[in-house]
Image (tube, rainbow, N blue to C red):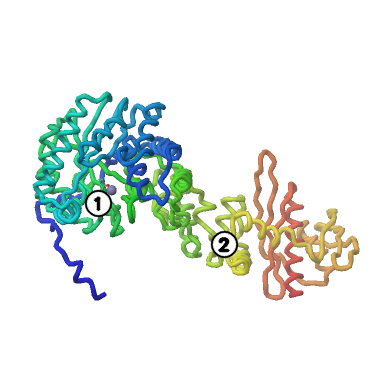
């Protein structure tokens, strides 16, 4: 592309002193999570949420376990102001939740912000100003000394208002807007000047927040910047080091993870990565990445589909089907080989658990157990379409309907499934799969159906089979002998139909449904070099097998007709 030269610029390069973060393989504990859904997220919506929708969203965030929630920019407009008032007035903020409000470093707006938070028990007043040289010059028309002065004035104003405010605990936060495109030495100078005003202590900490307002650099550069600030910050003991990554390069999650390794203690972001442009960092992905490493993220994400649907409903934003963890298709395996590996991996795990082991999760193709996030194996993992194989088909019938098909029947049925899915040009849901199974193997009586059977012990067994010929409508009784009941019925049918076949496959198991249990028989017959399967279900095991035999015979006759 011919214009690439116009983007050439230099980034802060990690030197040996700012690469400690390289030594850890993963964050070892959850950071403090701060949701900015109701501010950064809300201001990025085509139709921002109203007060009632924001209340509902706020409630969900508290249910998910967020203890720090930025609820708005109250000086920006009436809805934001009224929402803050409503939460406080209606006592909707749990005692262990800290609300946060954003304000620019301008006195009238800071004053309005303090009006909004009157009566709040635990509140963070979040001051921000820009530290990027280019942005200050182009947007605010000022130099760097003015930028620093603005931040210090804002910090002073907040401190003075907080001393007289009618609130419980007030914490201060300072965000350096466009931190990643600023000179880190200048950023450090500004945040140390702000800290000088606030004089935070171990007991009364302030938050310093490093904002990747636009994500411009690679994650390792961001991590090194975080490390640089961490190592050189004044009042270190009194500071909670926070990051606020956006996702313009698509690497906000990686940048945040590296920032945590570099010493960030707190992360501001949103559910599913909502927010300005490409969004803020997705806290769900971050938290679940941690979870997949065996670290408790300290958020309640066990019912992710619920959170996803509330989120979509309130914001009007859709979650893409490939969104990590939350997307509809992220655990789905359609292809036969993946389904086979997953089914085997699941079985292996069940065997380990049954043997009393506590195995680390290692099922192929699944980074976490979908059930831990409120997903179902049958609906979300092994999904059936024309790409699927016998393992997947067998797995769904076993999980959803407790049918343990013989391996050869799985193979036989997977051909029918492929055909049906191709014809419909879509996937088949578990109930459709079951219906196709019943239609194909259980209910086929197109040529002949058995009305009754009687058995007599002679030299072996003699069966008298009353059958209905579906072609003629006639009912008749035919006899057959064999060394068992099924063999005798098989011979009686063979004689009537003048067909030569033998039983070459048979399995049976019990199906438990509530308190009653039924037997299910899978039976195949061989004729003209091919096998035909039938399945029978009945309270009585022999009747189930006779039904399976009859269905197999009908399948053979249907095939001959084709
Ligand atoms: O992205 C950003 O810089 C912000 C600040 C206001 C913190 O949202
Ligand atoms: Zn932001």
Which mark, residue 427?
2
Task: Tell me the CA gap for discs 2 and 1.
Answer: 42 Å
Rendered position, 270 above or below 15 = above
Q: Which residue is mark 1?
A: 213
If the image is split into quadrants, where does the C terminus sit? Answer: bottom right
**Residue 247 position within the rendered picture, expressed as x and y whole percent measured from the top left:** 30, 55
Quarter of the image where one finds residue 532: bottom right
Using a 10 Å C-alpha cutoff, classify the residue at mark 1 as few (fewer than 14 neighbours), some (14 to 19) or many (20 or more).
many
**Residue 348 position within the rendered picture, expressed as x and y whole percent measured from the top left:** 46, 52
Rendered position, 383 above or below 106 = below
Q: Determine whether, in the image, residue 18 is placed left or right of residue 411.
A: left
Label 1 CB, ligand 1: below 8 Å? yes
Can see residue 496? Answer: yes
Question: Regarding mark 2 in the picture, which secondary structure is present there?
Answer: loop
The residue nearer to you, when weighing 164 against 95, is 164
Can see residue 352? Answer: no
**Residue 264 position within the rendered picture, expressed as x and y whole percent measured from the top left:** 21, 44
Quarter of the image where one finds residue 9: bottom left
If the image is split into quadrants, where does the N terminus sit? Answer: bottom left
* Tag in front: 2 or 1: 1
């Amino acid at each position: 592309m011919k214009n690439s030269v116009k983007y050439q610029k230099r980034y802060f390069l990690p030197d040996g002193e700012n690469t400690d973060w390289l030594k850890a393989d993963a964050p070892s504990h959850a950071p403090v999570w701060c949701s900015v859904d109701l501010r950064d997220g809300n201001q990025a919506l085509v139709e921002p949420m109203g007060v009632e929708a924001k209340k509902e969203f706020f409630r969900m965030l508290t249910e998910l376990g967020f203890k720090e929630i930025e609820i708005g920019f109250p000086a920006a407009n009436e809805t934001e102001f009224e929402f803050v008032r409503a939460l406080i007035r209606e006592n909707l903020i749990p005692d262990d939740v800290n609300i946060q409000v954003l304000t620019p470093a301008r006195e009238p707006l800071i004053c309005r912000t303090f009006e909004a938070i009157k009566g709040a028990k635990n509140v963070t007043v979040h001051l921000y100003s820009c530290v990027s040289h280019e942005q200050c010059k182009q947007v605010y028309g000022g130099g760097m000394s003015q930028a620093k002065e603005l931040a210090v004035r804002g910090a002073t104003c907040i401190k003075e208002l907080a001393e007289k405010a009618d609130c419980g605990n007030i914490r201060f936060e300072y965000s350096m807007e466009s931190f990643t495109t600023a000179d880190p030495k200048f950023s450090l100078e500004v945040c140390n000047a702000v800290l000088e005003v606030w004089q935070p202590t171990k007991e009364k900490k302030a938050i310093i927040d490093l904002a990747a307002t636009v994500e411009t650099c690679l994650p390792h550069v961001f991590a090194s910047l975080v490390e640089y600030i961490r190592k050189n910050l004044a009042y270190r003991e009194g500071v909670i080091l926070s990051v606020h990554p956006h996702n313009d390069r698509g690497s906000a999650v990686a940048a945040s993870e590296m920032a945590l390794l570099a010493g960030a203690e707190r992360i501001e972001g949103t559910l599913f990565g909502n927010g300005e442009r490409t969004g803020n960092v997705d806290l769900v992905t971050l938290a679940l990445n941690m979870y997949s490493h065996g670290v408790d993220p300290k958020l309640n994400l066990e019912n992710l589909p619920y959170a996803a649907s509330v989120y979509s409903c309130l914001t009007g934003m859709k979650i893409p089907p490939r969104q990590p963890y939350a997307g509809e298709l992220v655990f789905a395996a359609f292809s036969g080989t993946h389904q086979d590996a997953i089914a085997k991996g699941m079985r292996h795990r069940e065997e380990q658990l049954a043997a009393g082991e506590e195995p680390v999760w290692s099922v192929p193709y699944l980074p976490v157990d979908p059930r831990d996030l409120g997903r179902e194996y049958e609906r979300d993992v092994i999904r059936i379409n024309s790409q699927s194989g016998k393992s997947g088909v067998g797995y769904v019938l076993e999980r959803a309907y407790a049918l343990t098909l013989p391996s050869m029947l799985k193979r036989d049925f997977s051909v029918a499934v492929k055909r049906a899915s191709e014809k419909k040009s879509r996937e088949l849901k578990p109930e459709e799969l079951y219906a196709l199974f019943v239609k194909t193997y259980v209910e086929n009586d197109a040529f002949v159906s058995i009305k009754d059977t009687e058995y007599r012990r002679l030299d072996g067994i003699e069966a008298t089979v009353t059958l209905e010929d579906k072609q003629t409508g006639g009912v008749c009784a035919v006899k057959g002998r064999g060394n068992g009941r099924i063999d005798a019925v098989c011979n009686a049918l063979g004689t009537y139909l003048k067909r030569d076949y033998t039983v070459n496959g048979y399995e049976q198991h019990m199906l438990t449904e509530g308190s009653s249990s039924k037997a299910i028989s899978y039976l195949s017959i061989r004729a003209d070099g091919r096998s035909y399967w039938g399945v029978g279900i009945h309270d009585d095991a022999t009747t189930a097998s006779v039904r399976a035999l009859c269905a197999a015979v009908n399948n053979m006759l249907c095939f001959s007709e084709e």
